[in-house]
């Protein structure tokens, strides 16, 4: 009983399954029956657009598989009845699209066909076609996959198909793009496709050969003219050529066959950089900053945007791709408007620019509108930008050649002007030479007269200098004589007074003896007073003799200026002793610190004159307004020479005065007895006769320091003359 129930249950289950399977098959057949089948038995040399034969299913989730599509509920969602067109266009969409195609071979022979998708910007493509076992074979390729994944090597996507005789096949295509989604799908006979392929590659080679020739041509022009406009045009042509090669699939085939993300963004980046180069080229060629300065600022802004905009493709490709097309359209129209305005301003180069780029921009606009889905896919919209670019290069070659000729004409004119200016310059120089020759004779006479006058003036100046030097030396010697004479008054006066007193005492003693009143006490007093007065007379005479000897030696040295060996300490003491009377009552003193063993073979007279000038300079200037002070004279032997230092702790000098103290006739006591020649003469003696040097350092409030250096043995030279001094 239980077995009968189980048997009935199984029978019912099988019948239900067969019923449901039959319904599913009928539903699938009914869905396929709505598809428009294409009979490929007839031959045709022209391609067949498959747009109207497709059943289309949108896949927003990007998850549908071939097995899902073959289920009745999914198969029924395909939309049929597509209008006849060159391509299916869905604009910028994140969805994938499944295309179902029914192909029928009603002939008695198998046929081979090429299925071409003539749009290289599809990121992912899957082709599913039946195999001999009743299953499906799949091919996955696309712009984001390596070029080696393609079933047939072509810049577009081509798939060989084999259809058996009297058979019908269902083919599935899945297409997806990160940019604009276009599907210009065509079916070719294999020989016709190969012929078309050869012509297509020849056309592409023609275009890119032209672009290469333009790059080389403008590169040669740049080397010849050094004009930056040619470099900018080279950048534009190079970027545009790379952009178009990426757009039409040649770059994927030959330049970066294994690229993934770069294959998607290379076109957008290339077009954006191309427009940046184009704007830069237009600004340089048309001088927009002069003709349309306000528009030029907008041009620079657009150029900057196009240089930065490619960074957005890495972050959000699909979003920036759509806006890049709008930005490119706007920029193209703005470039065309700016160049047209320059042509309106009658700028010569603008005529060529507008003529060349109007066609190019028109082609670019049609290309962009096709990408956006506004215009249909046809020969003009597909190849418009490439045709426009080719015509632009041809026309712009004429423009650049005209620019070359214009530059050459300007150069020739400049050369003519330069030659003319050079000729005028030579004529002017000849006239000038003639004038100079005529003036030379007059100048020779005047120069002779001036030379004679200058010689006489120099002789007078030398004589005046000699007289001034002699006057200064005599004034110094006169001051020395006056001081010594004043100093001699005391010892001579004392001796004279004492001698007179002694004479009176002797006469009184004589009178006392004559009267006979001589006493012992009187005689003792006379003898004692006589001895005291004799000692006083002796001391006074010795003091006078010492002063006379010192003065005699100093006077002989300063008047004779003969070379001899002398002791430096004795020379300094004699000169200071001779000068001391002139400042005996001054509130400052002189101290000497000179070793007794310094022997010199030099000129004591000129050296003494330097000592006298430095001491008298201190008397006149160093201690003005000071209650006390010290002038220290010291000397040391170093490196076979003597270094004498005259340092005081007086008022000092500022930098302005210090810079001029050795100049002739410079003095701060002009009209008060100062000649301004003392230090100048001292410097000449030190550097000339003595073969040494004289330097000074000073600061206000810190005193002054004169450093005299001279060799122990004076250089071999003739004795100095008064003029040299």
Image (cartoon, rainbow, N blue to C red):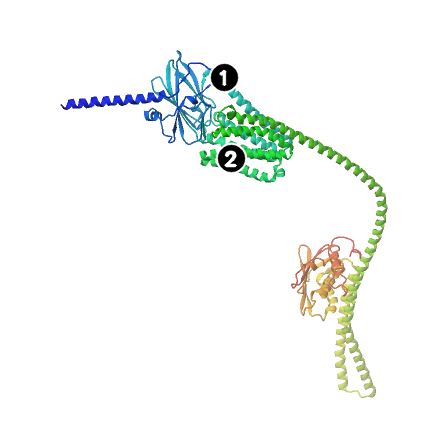
Count residues near mark 2 (Cα–Cα under 10 Å), then give few for <14, some for 14-19, many for 20+.
some
Numbered circle sitting on residue 327? 2
- For the question of whether residue 603 can be seen, the reply is no
Vertically, is 130 above or below 451? above
Q: Quadrant of residue 668?
A: bottom right
Q: Can you identify the residue that label 1 sits on?
A: 195
Vertically, is 446 above or below 267? below
Task: Measuring from the top left, give residue 139's x and y in whole percent.
Answer: 40, 23
Q: Earlier in the sequence, mark 1 or mark 2?
A: 1
- For the question of whether residue 379 can be seen, the reply is yes
Helix, strand or loop at mark 1: helix
Task: Measuring from the top left, give residue 710's x and y in whole percent.
Answer: 71, 56
Task: Measuring from the top left, give residue 201's x and y in whole percent.
Answer: 51, 21
Residue in the image at 38% along x and 31% along y: 60
Of residues 514 and 417, which is closer to you in this image? 417
Vertically, is 689 above or below 124? below
Of residues 261 and 271, which is closer to you in this image? 271
Of residues 173 and 345, which is closer to you in this image? 345
Which-is-in-front pick, marks 1 and 2? 2
Task: Measuring from the top left, give residue 310's x and y in whole percent.
Answer: 49, 35
Residue in the image at 51% along x and 19% along y: 199
Residue in the image at 37% along x and 17% along y: 168
Vertically, is 428 above or below 645? above
Helix, strand or loop at mark 2: helix
Of residues 266 and 700, which is closer to you in this image? 266
206 left or right of 450 in image: left
């Amino acid at each position: 009983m239980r077995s009968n129930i189980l048997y009935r249950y199984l029978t019912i289950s099988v019948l239900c399954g067969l019923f449901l399977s039959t319904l599913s098959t009928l539903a699938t057949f009914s869905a396929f029956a709505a598809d428009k089948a294409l009979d490929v038995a007839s031959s045709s040399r022209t391609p067949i657009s498959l747009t109207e034969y497709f059943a289309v299913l949108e896949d927003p989730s990007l998850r549908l598989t071939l097995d899902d599509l073959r289920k009745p509920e999914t198969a029924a969602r395909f939309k049929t009845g597509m209008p006849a067109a060159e391509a299916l266009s869905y604009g910028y969409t994140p969805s994938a699209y499944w295309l179902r195609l029914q192909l029928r071979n009603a002939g008695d022979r198998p046929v081979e066909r090429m299925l071409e998708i003539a749009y290289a910007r599809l990121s992912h493509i899957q082709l599913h076609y039946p195999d001999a076992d009743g299953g499906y074979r799949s091919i996955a390729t696309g712009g984001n996959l390596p070029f080696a994944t393609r079933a047939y090597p072509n810049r577009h996507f081509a798939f060989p198909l084999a259809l058996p005789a009297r058979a019908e096949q269902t083919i599935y295509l899945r297409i997806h793009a990160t940019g604009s989604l276009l599907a210009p799908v065509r079916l070719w006979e294999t020989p016709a496709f190969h012929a078309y392929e050869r012509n297509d590659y020849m056309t592409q080679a023609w275009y890119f050969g032209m672009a290469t020739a333009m790059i080389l041509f403008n590169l040669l022009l740049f080397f010849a003219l050094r004009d930056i406009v040619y470099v900018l045009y080279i950048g534009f042509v190079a970027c545009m050529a790379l952009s178009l090669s990426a757009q039409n699939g040649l770059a994927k085939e030959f330049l970066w066959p294994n690229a993934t993300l770069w294959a998607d963004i290379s076109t957008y980046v290339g077009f954006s950089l191309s427009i940046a180069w184009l704007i830069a080229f237009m600004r340089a060629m048309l001088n927009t900053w002069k003709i349309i300065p306000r528009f030029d600022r907008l041009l620079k802004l657009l150029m900057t945007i196009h240089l930065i905009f490619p960074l957005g493709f890495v972050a959000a490709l699909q979003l920036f791709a759509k806006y890049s097309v709008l930005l490119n359209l706007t920029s193209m129209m703005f470039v065309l408007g700016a160049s047209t305005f320059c042509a309106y301003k009658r700028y010569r180069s603008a005529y060529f620019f507008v003529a060349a780029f109007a066609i190019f921009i028109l082609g670019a606009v049609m290309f962009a509108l096709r990408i956006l889905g506004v215009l249909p896919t046809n020969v003009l919209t597909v190849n418009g930008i490439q045709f426009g670019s080719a015509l632009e290069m041809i026309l712009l070659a004429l423009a650049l050649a005209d620019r070359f000729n214009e530059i050459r004409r300007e150069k020739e004119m400049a050369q003519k002007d330069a030659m003319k200016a050079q000729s005028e310059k030579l004529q002017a120089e000849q006239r000038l030479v003639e004038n100079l020759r005529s003036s030379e004779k007059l100048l020779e006479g005047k120069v002779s007269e001036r030379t004679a006058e200058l010689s006489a003036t120099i002789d007078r100046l030398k004589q005046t200098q000699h007289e001034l030097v002699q006057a200064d030396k005599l004034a110094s010697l006169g001051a020395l004589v006056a001081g010594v004479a004043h100093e001699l008054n005391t010892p001579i006066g004392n001796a004279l007074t004492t001698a007179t007193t002694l004479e009176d005492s002797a006469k009184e003693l004589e009178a006392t003896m004559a009267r006979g009143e001589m006493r012992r006490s009187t005689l003792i007093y006379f003898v004692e007073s006589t001895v005291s007065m004799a000692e006083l007379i002796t001391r006074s005479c010795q003091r006078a003799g010492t002063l006379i000897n010192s003065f005699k030696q100093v006077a002989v040295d300063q008047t004779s200026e003969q070379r001899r060996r002398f002791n430096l300490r004795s020379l300094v003491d004699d000169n200071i002793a001779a000068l001391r009377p002139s400042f005996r009552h001054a509130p400052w003193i002189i101290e000497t610190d000179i070793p007794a063993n310094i022997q010199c073979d030099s000129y004591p007279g000129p050296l003494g004159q330097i000592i006298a000038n430095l001491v008298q300079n201190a008397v006149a200037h160093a201690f003005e307004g000071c209650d006390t002070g010290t002038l220290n004279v010291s000397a040391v032997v170093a490196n076979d020479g003597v270094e004498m230092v005259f340092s005081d702790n007086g008022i000092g000098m500022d930098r302005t005065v210090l810079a001029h103290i050795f100049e002739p006739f410079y003095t701060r006591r002009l009209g008060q007895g100062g000649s301004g020649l003392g230090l100048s003469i001292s410097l000449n003696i030190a550097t000339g006769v003595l073969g040494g040097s004289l330097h000074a350092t000073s600061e206000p409030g810190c005193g002054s320091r004169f450093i005299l250096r001279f060799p122990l043995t004076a250089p071999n030279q003739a004795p100095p003359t008064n003029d040299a001094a």
